[in-house]
Image (cartoon, grey):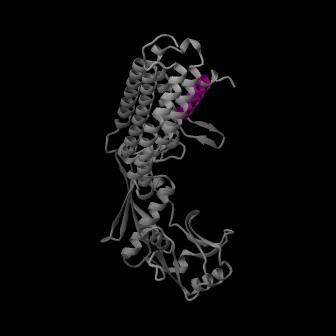
Amino acid sequence: MNSKRVFFITVLLTAALFCLSIFGLKIGNFWIKGADQMRYGIDIRGGVEATYEPKDLGRAPTENELEAIRTIIETRMDAKNITDRDVTVDKGNGKVIVRFPWKSDETNFDPQKAVSELGETAKLTFRDPDGNVIMEGTDVTKSSAQLSQSDSQPAVALTLSARGADKFAQATGRLIGQNIDIYMDEALISTAIVQTQITGGNAEITHLESLQAATLLANRINSGSLPYSLIVKNCNIISPTLGSNALAVMVMAGKVAFALVCLFMLIYYRLPGLVACIALTLQVTGQLLALSVPQFTLTLPGIAGLILSIGMGVDANIIISERIKEELNGGKTVLRAIETGFKRAFSAVFDGNVTVVIVAIILIIFGSGSMLSFGYTLLCGVIMNFVAGVTASRLMIRSLSNFKALRQPQYFGAKGAVQ
């Protein structure tokens, strides 16, 4: 393929993806949602407040049971990418209060319909490698986090009912050396390898990375063995904390800021500035698709992560443009200056982005709610920075440099004769 065409192909691809990210695409049951169909957080769009109570329990729920309800609700919200939520346990009244945002396609603002998105109490199952259910959550009478008696490492201790002990003994007897998977609904939450047949009604899940992870798994297992169902009472509408026009103001501010940045890049860096503007458009497009396609909740901290990553993209393009200009002012040809400039700039861009990637991954692994939203948008932004700000920029500048008319230092913000 003629390398001169790479620039135009990249521009066309960026334009196509940009239109897709803004307007979406729906063909039959295949639907890619656009930017106007994102799921925004409570602070931006508002949402629902619902109170969950035990149904026909006949007694007050225990603290462990309430924590299990909290865990199951948070697990379901994580599975639906609802990161902006507030799940509060009211121990005194035996209730769990949940606040979460509207769905992107919610138009009639019916709180009861919105709450149904979370569904009923989750079902916990233990399955063999073939997917056959060998035991259910109701067969577990108690689950708790502890340090293993064998090696003092984090583990989860299971106490089984008489029926559950029989099922587990038969299953572990035939699955030695194989996996037993634990599912919450259809979501895999843990996998353990059977070391030996387990009898007596007591089992232990080992090789967990931390006591915190063991506690989380224990709560999830307990949530799947609740002896009652949940009912929803007192659904209320929550107004956006930033006001109904906050989103429109933020979008307008983003457009103005993006236009000013592109104008500066074009005036100061010229040809590399043009490439930088296209690369930034591709980066923003990728981030919008990473939010709208999986319907990941965009919160105010998430917008902060989006802006921060765009700023890093601008910084990467400035570093690259400055390095190219330095090489040209040093007397190198345009082609040589582009190769050397990218090579010298890559280490600085790479080091800065990798450290942010590490922070974003930590936020995603250990964070939840708004912290998870911030980490996700930041990670997607940094990844797109590598794709657009480094790789795509390099391909486009190389492509343009194949046009002899563009091989002039002044087109790159430098001084010198025609190269």
Rendered view: 263 above or below 158: above
Q: Is residue 383 visible?
A: yes
Q: Is residue 254 left or right of residue 293?
A: left
Rendered view: 367 above or below 337: below
Residue 157 picture location, percent across and down: 48, 79
For the N terminus, which image quadrant? Answer: top right
Q: Is residue 283 left or right of residue 132?
A: left
Examine the structure image and report whether residue 14 is included in the region drawn in magenta: yes
Examine the structure image and report whether residue 205 is included in the region drawn in magenta: no
Which range is magenta?
7-23
Residue 322 picture location, percent across and down: 41, 26
Residue 164 picture location, percent across and down: 58, 82
- The residue at the far left in this view is 92
Rendered view: 217 above or below 34: below
- The residue at the far bottom in this view is 200
Q: Is residue 101 visible?
A: no
Dominant secondary-structure state across the stretch colored magenta: helix
Rendered view: 213 above or below 257: below
Q: Would you identify the image quadrant in which residue 27 lies? A: top right
Choose between 291 and 106: the one closer to the eye: 291
Q: Would you identify the image quadrant in which residue 252 lies? A: top left
